[in-house]
Image: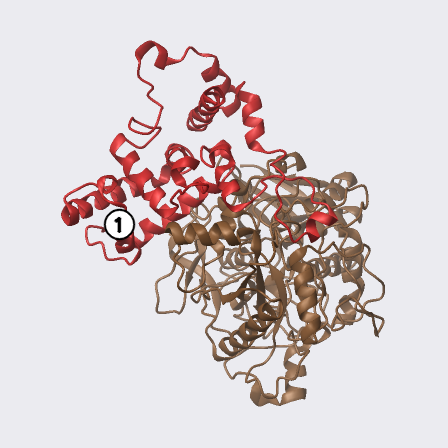
Chain colours: A brown, B red
């Protein structure tokens, strides 16, 4: 049992935690961070091994040691999810992610107001807890900019200070300056997507990625090896916080990282302040760190779990939960896929970065008129791979053959041998609305390797709004596949009700302590020296991947702590 | 051909033994390959596969798994299947290493399959005709094989299919995808550190051989 003292303790150094660690350490605060997994070095990723990293999910949580359970509704029994797609090491999910780095649209921050203004209050489903964010895009813009330049994001501006720029996303929120790096090169699948989308009349563009297209800040440019999403990057071109922010934190001399540490509790006193955290070391030791500021930055599930595990007599419903909102409004994208296969050409879709290579944005957010479609909000539409990546294991498991072709035997072999290098995947990731009964709580039966109750998700995406969204997007994907001239176009089966990519919610931010867990600085309303960061705070989720917004919000919080909170500890909003 | 294969096998067995002992796989592999081969003295190679005992699977189970994998990914002239790729070897080594927690799953699943085949055809799976084998696999896939309790027949099939694909397409260092036969089947070039702009934009098949990877490292280590 060891006890240490520091200024700031951070739980988890992933997309958000590593940024906070670097920024606060640079500001002169002593920072101690805890990480459940190891800290890899770049050389660890030179084994470009699809079995180990994609299929056996090294770099992601072991589902037996660290289960997350799921049930479709409160009457069903929860069972452990079979794959968890978040990170389990220093750098978190940014080590293995596809590095798609969007800024949210302006209307993503005010989805309820925008919907009501344009279509009337009746169109918001009665059971949805759709809410505006407590901050606007323009407040966050400088922090998006900083994140893009610090990380190294490659892309093409579509809206520079209100001027629409050819070649970028014309629907993007206005940015103050260009991306720091030009877009990544297109492969054959991106070229096919670009041509087909233009022919239909959309405005496609290379999706922005936190992967450097040219040498940048001492790092070498991407070489398009394709061992990308699902893998750590062999040459460090992927802008994971492992290679961008942790070295910065190290250089300050104010930063200490404890790896293989399982934080199980946030400690608090009777005055209502957080005093620090307790964690199990790799040897089973029970340790405590005392700190002036406690920042929770693990993945979505563990933000809720830690708050619920940290209940006291003063906080009987869990820490920071006087609103009763902790664990509510859980969301995830619903991924619909359409396969396109070609007899007249190879696509070689295993090349290059895998995630959302090329996109168009006509059906995202409120970029199109929803008056007659029967649902609100939308989805990005992109070209991608059958699994997280395009290698043969991911494709054998993710490329479900068309109706009439079996999944095994000579006919399957012939199908796969012919189309492995001749297919691509069209993808939509629709924006789930928040619902109060989509929740994370503590599983009463399933425990993790430390004996702690597993996070339990209660969720089923089959809500009327979501079902109509998905059906609409599938038709757009079909149309695109046909416009590409593909020989075969067919739909992937949709998942059962379980959460898809990019889980969010559980500790939503808001404008009052009554209906939210944290304020716009990700600061607990109840416990002012406790910050809960990451996409668990998102009140709504956008049809875009969340990571760059998580990172912009981390900068926003770091700025508020270093420049305001430190001088005058107390509520920031 | 036989010499590199033997040394690779020695490396793989070493890696498994190393993982089991919690020791470094490299050091153990070196010991195994330097030690005098037991087979030469006794005439029995305890770690060979096929009709004899493997790293985990016994002789009968080896035959069943090999036959199942071959029906899932059958070989044909010019199209290497599970047998040619060494999928049995992959699964055997995986069950003795990374998938030790699936040993009972396989034992029970294979026993239930044997019961099903004896009852239906009065013969073991490996001895059935290809048509009977396919009919049996369809029964598993449809969840209709009544001899199964745990694992459920559909889950057993799904697992076998997944492991067959792993054995076809994982880096050969894991014991399958022999001589890149799985990668050659589908036209995957393995590890390529760089794709050029022209290669990214090409509509043609990409035919360069794998340039680097675990496979080449394993060969270096074991010689």
Q: Chain of mark 1?
A: B
Q: Which residue is mark 1?
A: B131
Relative to A504, is A229 above or below?
Answer: above
Q: Position of residue A12 (x, y in %)?
A: 61, 49
Left/right of residue B172 with respect to residue A405 in the rendered view:
right
- Residue A525 visible in the picture: no
Apparent side of residue A423 relative to residue A555 in the rendered image (left or right)? left
Give residue B71's position: percent from left, percent from top. Answer: 34, 46
Could you tell me if residue B118 is visible in this image? yes
Residue B95: image quadrant is top left
Label 1: how many Cα within 10 Å (few below 14, some 14–19, many 20+): few
Is A280 or A101 nearer to us in this picture? Answer: A101
Residue at the (69%, 60%) spot, across then down = A191
The image quadrant of residue B46 is top left
Q: Position of residue A141 (x, y in %)?
A: 78, 66
Compared across the picture, whether A22 is left or right of A316 comes to right
Q: Secondary structure at mark 1?
A: helix
Which sits in the foreground, A508 or B206? B206
- The correct choice, above or below, for B51 with respect to A437 in the image is above
Q: Which residue is outermost to the front?
A: B77
Q: Quadrant of the C terminus of chain B?
A: top right
Question: Looking at the picture, how far across and down is residue A382, in whole percent?
Answer: 63, 64
Front residue of A12/B31: it is B31
- Give the mark count: 1
Q: State the residue at coordinates (67%, 87%).
A: A118
């Amino acid at each position: 049992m060891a006890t240490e003292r520091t200024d700031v303790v951070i739980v988890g150094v992933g997309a958000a935690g590593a940024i906070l660690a670097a920024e606060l350490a640079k500001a002169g605060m002593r920072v101690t961070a805890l990480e459940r997994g190891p800290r890899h070095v770049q050389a660890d990723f030179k084994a470009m091994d699809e079995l180990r990293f994609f299929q056996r999910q090294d770099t992601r949580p072991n589902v037996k040691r660290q289960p997350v359970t799921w049930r479709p509704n409160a009457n069903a029994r929860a069972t452990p999810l079979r794959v968890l797609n978040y990170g389990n090491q220093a750098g978190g999910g940014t080590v293995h992610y596809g590095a798609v780095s969007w800024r949210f649209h302006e209307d993503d921050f005010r989805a309820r107001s925008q919907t009501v203004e344009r279509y009337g209050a009746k169109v918001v489903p009665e059971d949805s807890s759709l809410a505006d964010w407590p901050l606007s895009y323009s407040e966050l813009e400088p922090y998006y900019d900083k994140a893009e330049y610090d990380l190294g994001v490659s892309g093409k501006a579509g809206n520079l200070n209100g001027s629409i720029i050819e070649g970028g996303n014309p629907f993007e929120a206005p940015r103050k300056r260009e991306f720091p790096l030009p877009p990544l090169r297109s492969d054959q699948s991106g070229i096919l997507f670009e041509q087909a989308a233009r022919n239909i009349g959309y405005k496609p563009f290379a999706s922005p990625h936190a992967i450097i297209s040219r040498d940048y800040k001492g790092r070498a440019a991407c070489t398009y090896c394709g061992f990308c999403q699902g893998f750590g990057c062999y040459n460090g071109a992927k802008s994971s916080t492992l290679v961008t922010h942790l070295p910065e934190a190290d250089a300050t001399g104010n930063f200490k990282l404890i790896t293989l540490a399982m934080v199980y509790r946030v400690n608090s006193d009777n005055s209502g302040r957080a005093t620090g955290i307790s964690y199990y070391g790799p040897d089973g030791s029970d340790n405590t760190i005392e700190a002036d500021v406690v920042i929770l930055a693990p993945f979505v599930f563990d933000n809720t779990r830690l708050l619920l595990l940290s209940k006291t007599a003063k906080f009987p419903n869990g820490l920071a939960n006087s609103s009763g909102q902790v664990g509510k409004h859980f969301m995830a994208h619903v991924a619909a896929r359409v396969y396109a296969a070609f007899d007249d050409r190879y696509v070689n879709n295993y090349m290059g970065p895998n995630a959302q290579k090329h996109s168009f944005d006509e059906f995202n957010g409120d970029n199109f008129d929803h008056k007659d479609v029967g649902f609100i909000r939308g989805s990005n539409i992109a070209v991608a791979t059958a699994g997280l990546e395009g290698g043969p294991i991911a494709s054998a498991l993710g490329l479900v053959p068309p109706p009439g072709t079996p999944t095994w035997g000579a006919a399957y072999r012939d199908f796969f041998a012919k189309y492995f290098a001749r297919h691509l995947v069209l993808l939509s990731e629709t924006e789930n609305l928040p619902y109060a009964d989509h929740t994370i709580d503590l599983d009463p039966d399933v425990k993790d390797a430390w004996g702690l109750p597993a996070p339990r998700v209660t969720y089923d995406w089959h809500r009327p709004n979501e079902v109509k969204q998905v059906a609409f997007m599938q038709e757009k994907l079909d149309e695109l596949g046909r416009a590409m001239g593909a020989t075969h176009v067919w739909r992937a089966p949709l998942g059962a009700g379980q959460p898809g990519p990019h889980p969010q919610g559980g500790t939503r931010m808001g404008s009052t302590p009554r209906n939210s867990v944290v304020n716009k600085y990700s600061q607990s309303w109840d416990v002012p020296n406790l910050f809960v960061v990451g996409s668990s705070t998102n009140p709504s989720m956008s049809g875009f991947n969340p990571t760059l917004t998580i990172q912009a919000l981390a900068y926003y919080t770091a700025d508020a702590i270093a420049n305001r909170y430190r001088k005058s500890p107390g509520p920031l909003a | 051909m036989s010499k590199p294969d033997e040394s690779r096998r020695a490396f793989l067995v070493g890696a498994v033994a190393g993982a089991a002992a919690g020791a470094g796989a490299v050091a153990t592999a070196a010991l195994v390959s330097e030690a005098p081969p037991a087979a030469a003295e006794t005439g029995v190679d305890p770690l060979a596969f096929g009709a004899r005992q493997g790293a985990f699977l016994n002789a009968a189970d080896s035959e069943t798994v090999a036959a199942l994998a071959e029906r899932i990914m059958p070989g044909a002239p010019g199209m290497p299947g599970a047998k040619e790729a060494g999928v049995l070897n992959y699964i055997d080594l995986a069950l003795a290493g990374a998938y030790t927690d699936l040993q009972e799953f396989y034992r029970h699943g294979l026993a239930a399959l044997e019961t099903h085949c004896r009852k239906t055809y009065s013969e073991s799976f490996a001895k059935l005709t290809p048509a009977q084998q396919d009919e049996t696999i369809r029964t598993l896939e449809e969840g209709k094989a009544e001899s199964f309790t745990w694992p459920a027949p559909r889950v057993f099939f799904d697992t076998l299919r997944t492991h067959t694909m792993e054995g076809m397409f994982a880096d050969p260092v894991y014991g399958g995808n022999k001589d890149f036969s799985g990668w050659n089947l589908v036209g995957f070039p393995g590890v390529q550190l760089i794709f050029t702009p022209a290669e990214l934009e090409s509509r043609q098949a990409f035919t360069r051989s794998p340039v680097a990877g675990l496979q080449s490292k394993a060969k270096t280590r074991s010689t």
